[in-house]
């Protein structure tokens, strides 16, 4: 196994294109675990942490461009970023423990393509966009279109994500992410819900994005959940409708982490709790 | 040995909280655990394990693996040519390396030694095993049915009633009186069935060893274990070695809780070493620890208790069915003994069934059999209290066993501390603290026997007067500190003058495993006796120096003093002064003591816990937890409190989230700490330990074991708290969110 340390995106793309068995290493908190468990045996590991542009956070058009190699802990030290997108930052901050957060990246979380990945529903709710570099140039793809199934992504041979873009935060908007785990820490989401809402002058919800995690092979960006909120003041009736829609939309499986019935119930409970936080944030109450 | 050893005294060192002697090495990474040693020319071992729950091994082809560069030995059961005639040992051998059948997912079928870890694992991939998959059973109730797949025929004892599967290997019965008559006197009788899941001890350090075994039959083994004498005797018995030719040294140990009282990889490593002619290191992965060591038994239990309106228990019965794993087990009988042990009952009967299943052979886990014994009993008592509107502590006090009570398992108790724990619970502020919405408070009692057993201690007085103490029990709970403290107390020297080490099997006589909460009691007793032996010698040496009769010498404050008619005639001789001239007064000075220690006092605890149940998710939060337990005498209170807290913490895991989950295919689905959920620090409140000291009459300082009782009440205490908070009785462990939510919804 070779260990490669490119310093430019082009070099990384070339290495990746030349060797279909090579794997990108960002924080390594998924990849190294799988390597040690002998679940993967790549011919080469390409570490992207020495590519300068992938390790920085920059402002762009009022939004945030986050290098794909930036770990969760570094993002969470930027107070402006946390103020704009608290839900996304909290989601990234839930990944593993302090030690894991010193390494784990959102791009890695996304490309690992676990249905239970914590930062993904939050990014989807926020409308985040991944920038992809590959042999035929650069393209931007909505985060929800990257994972195509457990462990599978829409990235083509030779492609990697170079950054995640969080758009400018609309006025009177707020986001939130909650997950349900049987423990208080160090666990995998049984259900995760990301919500982003924007209010109009009357205090009614004018736009909403609701993303459900761990209840389907990939994150569900639910229109019916959003519709339950849009046009309402986010009152109890709206939240009840949201909870019912989330329970309805969830298509989970029975497994060791939860039953279908339990996950559907929890999807509703969490959708309500998450939306409450997002609405309060949009109002500036939290 | 007399059971009136205890003598009241004022302690100088015992009962204080000195810094632990092993602490710095452990936090700085210097301590040497099982996997921390290497040897010249060492090879890496790895074990191939069955992916099937139950399968006949048709053939194993190791030729491709053997041909690989770097592979130095491949072994299967065929290499274990020595046949132990003891059936217990034959089971151990079969568990360490499968013979005809793989009996559970993870059962070892072959092993490799190679020049690197990677080559060893690549070689495992190259071994071809042909299996004939058989029907399997992993559930205890299913395994008892007459048509269940049989794990091994011919193992059933005569005491098993007809109509049950051969998987039921034995039945035990305890009790006295006539429960049926008792039930007819009751105002309320409640009968319920319960289940508990198999749980793992969850020790942080996986099993690891480094083995060297030569063609001459001489061997050395470095191993992480709770009992290196047990490892020596068992490995010698399995490989046909002379025990005296095999020296076993215990490493530091990162937790055991009963799970390291058996062998798994040690005989395999020795066999690989013999075949390869090199030292072999074998370290289990976490996955292997979960799949192939010994979790505790899962259980299915029926309990029936009758109570009068005033809280008097009139009759009680319990049937315990415990899943023993792939070989005949012996845990259900302990459940049958322990369930009603806290109570003074006229009419009580219990029975226990040991049941084989396609799971790893169950091992001891802290008070084996007792937590699942107390859980249903204490749950039904709690429900009776609820329905009869009785105070749960007062009701337990009313029925509590005391000195002179004939226990539910037979013997009559000497002085015991159960009532003291209940009274301490009643007067603790926790009992009257207000509860909020969705919150409930539970209490429960628990009992454990405690053991003594074979013990050897050697105490050397060095030429400079310092003291070296050798004991033969791996230190899992702070025993080096406690032994040093007891030796210093008895000798009357400062604690920093004593260092205790764990000697290897060639340096001391036979010592039983560190289990049964025996070490502080039994090794402590032997330490005190060894110190007294050394004192006798030192008194003789002083008497010789002074030219007086040894009987006319007293020992106190670390020095010999002329006494009686000679009092004051000579200045005292300190241990240093006596040691300095030992060579001229007869030679080196050492005390020792060898004993099969009896008189381990039984131990009781009462636990109190507040929980909050999230009505929408079923999640249980433990808000407050208090442990009241009798320690006899707390030698080092920090360690005693640690045992109380640790037992409660493990009990919380067992009650709320920990469970072995098997799929339809009979394979373990959660062999890792991600999905086998032990509580993390943020799941636990500060667990408040309240130490009670009712001296054990069988120990010079009154010590009782404390390591196990603390895991007995939590399952019940938490179930009672959750049931009260949720307004519905929960009868199945773990009380994980899906289960609690289903109960709340009445499903
Ligand atoms: C103890 C522990 C706890 C954890 N807890 C959580 C948790 O609570 N929630 C959660 O969601 N996850 C958790 N994880 C999983 C993991 O930490 C996260 O998924 C993390 O975000 C992965 O990021 P990484 O940078 O470490 O990815 P890596 O391991 O470096 O990569 C993951 C995968 O993505 C690919 N990849 C990485 N970066 C790129 C890129 N730029 N372009 C293309 N492909 C790329 C890699 O090739 C690999 O296949 C935990 C892991 C551990 C070990």
Image (tube, coloured by chain):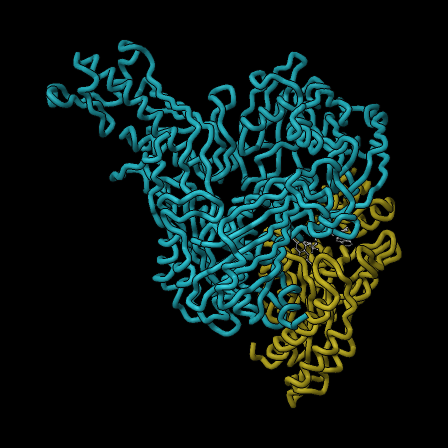
Chain colours: A yellow, B cyan
Q: Nearer the viewer, residue B728 or B119?
A: B728
Regarding residue B129, the answer to whether it shows in the image is yes
| Residue drawn at point x = 60 percent, y = 52 percent | B319
- In the rendered view, does A183 fall on the left or right side of B517? right
Q: Nearer the viewer, residue A61 or B508?
A: B508
Regarding residue B71, the answer to whether it shows in the image is no
- In the rendered view, does A152 fall on the left or right side of B658? right
The spot of residue B737 in percent (x, y) is 63, 64
The spot of residue B694 in percent (x, y) is 34, 46
The spot of residue B23 in percent (x, y) is 45, 38
| Residue drawn at point x = 81 percent, y = 45 percent | B135
Quarter of the picture containing the C terminus of chain B is bottom right
Indicate whether A126 appears above or below B501.
below
| Residue drawn at point x = 71 percent, y = 50 percent | B139
Indicate whether B117 appears above or below B638.
above
| Residue drawn at point x = 61 percent, y = 45 percent | B296
- In the rendered view, does A251 fall on the left or right side of B585? right
- In the rendered view, does A220 fall on the left or right side of B595? right
């Amino acid at each position: 196994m070779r260990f490669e340390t490119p310093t430019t995106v082009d070099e990384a793309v070339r290495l990746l294109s030349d060797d279909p068995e090579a794997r990108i290493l960002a924080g390594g908190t998924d990849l190294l675990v799988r390597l040690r468990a002998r679940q993967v045996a790549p011919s080469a590991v390409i570490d992207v942490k020495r590519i300068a542009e992938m390790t920085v956070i920059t402002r762009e058009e009022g939004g945030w461009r986050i290098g794909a190699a930036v770990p969760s802990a570094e993002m969470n030290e930027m107070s402006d970023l946390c103020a704009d997108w608290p839900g996304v930052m909290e989601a990234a901050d839930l990944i593993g423990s302090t030690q894991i957060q010193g390494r784990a990246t959102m791009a890695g979380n996304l490309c690992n393509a676990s249905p239970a990945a914590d930062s993904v529903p939050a990014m989807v709710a926020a409308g985040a966009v991944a920038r992809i570099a590959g042999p035929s140039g650069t393209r931007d793809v909505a985060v929800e279109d990257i994972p195509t199934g457990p462990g599978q992504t829409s990235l083509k041979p030779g492609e990697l994500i170079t950054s995640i873009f969080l758009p400018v935060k609309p006025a009177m908007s707020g986001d939130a992410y909650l997950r349900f785990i049987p423990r208080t820490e160090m666990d995998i989401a049984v259900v995760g819900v990301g919500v982003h809402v924007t209010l109009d002058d009357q205090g009614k919800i004018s736009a909403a994005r609701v993303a459900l995690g761990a209840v389907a092979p990939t994150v569900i960006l639910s229109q019916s959940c959003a519709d339950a909120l849009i046009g309402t003041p986010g009152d109890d009736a709206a939240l009840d409708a949201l909870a019912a829609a989330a329970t309805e939309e969830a298509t989970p499986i029975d497994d060791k982490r939860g039953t279908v019935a339990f996950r559907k119930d929890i999807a509703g409970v969490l959708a309500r709790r998450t939306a409450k936080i997002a609405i309060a944030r949009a109002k500036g109450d939290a | 040995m007399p059971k009136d050893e205890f003598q009241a005294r004022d302690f100088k060192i015992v009962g204080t909280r000195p810094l632990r002697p092993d602490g710095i090495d452990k936090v700085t990474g210097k301590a040497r655990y099982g996997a921390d040693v290497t040897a010249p020319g060492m090879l890496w071992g790895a074990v191939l394990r069955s992916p099937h729950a139950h399968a006949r091994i048709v053939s194993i082809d190791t030729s491709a693996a053997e041909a690989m560069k770097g592979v130095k030995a491949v072994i299967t059961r065929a290499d274990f040519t020595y046949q132990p005639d003891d059936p217990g040992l034959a089971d151990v051998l079969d568990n360490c390396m499968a013979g005809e059948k793989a009996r559970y997912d993870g059962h070892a079928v072959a092993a490799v030694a190679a020049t690197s870890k990677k080559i060893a694992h690549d070689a495992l991939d190259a071994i071809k095993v042909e299996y004939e998959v058989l029907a399997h059973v992993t559930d205890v109730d299913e395994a008892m049915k007459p048509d269940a797949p049989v794990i091994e025929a011919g193992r059933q004892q005569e005491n098993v009633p007809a109509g049950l599967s051969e998987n039921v290997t034995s039945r035990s019965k305890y009790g006295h009186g006539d429960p049926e008559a008792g039930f007819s006197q009751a105002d309320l009788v409640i009968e319920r069935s319960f289940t508990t899941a198999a749980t793992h001890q969850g020790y942080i350090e996986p099993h690891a060893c480094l083995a060297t075994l030569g063609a001459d039959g001489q061997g050395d083994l470095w191993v992480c274990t709770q009992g290196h004498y047990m490892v020596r005797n068992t490995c010698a018995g399995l490989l046909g070695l002379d025990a005296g030719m095999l020296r076993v040294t215990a490493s530091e140990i990162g937790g055991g809780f009963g799970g390291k009282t058996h062998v798994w990889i040690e005989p395999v490593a020795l066999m690989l070493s013999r075949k390869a002619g090199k030292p072999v290191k074998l370290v289990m992965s976490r996955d292997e620890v979960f799949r192939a060591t010994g979790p505790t038994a899962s259980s299915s239990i029926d309990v029936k208790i009758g109570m009068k309106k005033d809280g008097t228990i009139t009759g009680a019965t319990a049937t315990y069915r415990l899943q023993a794993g792939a070989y005949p087990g012996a845990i259900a009988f302990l459940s049958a003994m322990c369930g009603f042990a806290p109570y003074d009952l006229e009419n009580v009967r219990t029975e226990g069934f040991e049941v084989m299943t396609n799971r790893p052979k169950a091992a001891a886990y802290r008070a084996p059999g007792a937590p699942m014994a107390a859980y249903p009993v204490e749950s039904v008592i709690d429900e009776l209290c609820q329905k009869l509107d009785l105070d749960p502590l007062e009701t337990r006090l009313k029925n509590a066993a005391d000195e002179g009570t004939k226990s539910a398992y037979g013997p009559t108790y000497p002085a015991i501390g159960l009532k003291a724990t209940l009274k301490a619970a009643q007067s603790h502020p926790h009992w009257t603290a207000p509860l909020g919405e969705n919150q409930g408070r539970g209490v429960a009692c628990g009992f454990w026997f405690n053991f003594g057993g074979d013990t050897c201690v050697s105490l050397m007085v060095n030429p400079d007067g310092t003291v070296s103490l050798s004991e033969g029990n791996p230190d899992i709970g702070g025993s080096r500190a406690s032994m040093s403290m007891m030796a210093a107390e008895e000798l009357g020297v400062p604690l920093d003058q004593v260092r205790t080490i764990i000697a290897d099997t060639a340096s001391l006589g036979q010592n039983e495993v560190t289990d049964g909460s025996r070490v502080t009691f039994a090794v402590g007793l032997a330490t005190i006796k060894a110190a007294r032996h050394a004192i006798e010698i030192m008194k003789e040496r002083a008497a010789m120096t002074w030219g007086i009769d040894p009987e006319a010498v007293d020992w106190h404050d670390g020095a010999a003093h002329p006494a009686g008619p000679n009092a004051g005639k000579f200045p005292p001789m300190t241990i240093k002064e006596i040691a300095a001239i030992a060579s001229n007064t007869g030679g080196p000075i050492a005390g020792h003591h060898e004993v099969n220690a009896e008189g381990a006092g039984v131990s009781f605890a009462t636990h109190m816990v507040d929980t909050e149940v999230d009505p929408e998710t079923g999640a249980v939060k433990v808000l407050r937890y208090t442990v009241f337990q009798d320690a006899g005498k707390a030698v080092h209170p920090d360690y005693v409190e640690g045992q109380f807290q640790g037992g409660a913490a493990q009990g919380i895991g067992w009650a709320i989230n920990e469970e072995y989950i098997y799929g339809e295919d009979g394979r373990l689905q959660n062999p890792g700490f991600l999905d086998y959920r032990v509580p993390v620090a943020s799941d636990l409140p500060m667990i408040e330990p309240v130490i009670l000291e009712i001296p054990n009459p069988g120990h010079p300082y009154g010590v009782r074991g404390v390591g196990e009782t603390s895991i007995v009440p939590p399952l019940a205490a938490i179930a009672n708290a959750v049931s009260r908070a949720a307004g519905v009785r929960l009868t199945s462990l773990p009380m994980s969110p899906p289960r609690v939510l289903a109960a709340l919804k009445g499903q």
